[in-house]
Amino acid sequence: MNTRHLFKISGIILFIAIAGFFFATSDRAQDSAENTFQEQHTIVLSIEDGPSEKEMFISEDETMLSILKKLNAEDPALNLKTKEFEGLGTLVEEMYGLKNGVGNEYWQYTVNGIMPQIGADALVPETGDHVEWEFKASEF
């Protein structure tokens, strides 16, 4: 086999290897982007005395409490305060200066118009949920 023929074959093999590398890298990047998209979804959140309704992108496993903590970091006026209750979990004590018990009103939330019977630290909202926090007299 002559040298010229050997260089052609080597060039073809090198081209195939490089093309394979780029296709594999492109597929991994696309898979990663798709996985990131699939791991995030949106909810609509509104808090009495807070800014208007806000559409939020959240991770699949985020709890309502972790979402509020993230929002508190972005908006210090929220001034989120929580309290741990054994057997009940973490409950929201105060937001925007409105503290539980004042005027016999408490922070309560609904998801799609229904009040969940679990604390904010246990609720994981689903795509498209509308979560509304209100400061009002207890229904219990």
Image (tube, helix red, strand yellow):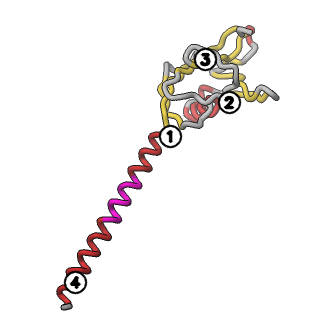
Residue at 33%, 62% in the rendered image? 22
**Residue 39 x, y percent position in the rendering:** 50, 40
Q: Residues within 10 Å of mark 3 (few under 14, many from 20)?
A: some
Give, as a three-letter code, the residue at label 3. Thr
Q: Earlier in the sequence, mark 3 or mark 2?
A: 3
Label 1 sits on residue: 39
Spatial distance from mark 4 to mark 1, Cα to Cα?
Answer: 48 Å
Rendering quarter of residue 111: top right
Label 2 sits on residue: 122
- The N terminus is located in which quarter? bottom left
Which secondary structure, mark 4? helix
Q: The magenta stretch spans which residues?
A: 20-29
Label 4 sits on residue: 7
Image vertical order of residue 60 relative to residue 88, above or below: below
Mark 4 and mark 1 residues within 8 Å of each other at the beta carbon: no
Give, as a three-letter code, the residue at label 1. Glu
The prevailing secondary structure element of the residues shown in magenta is helix
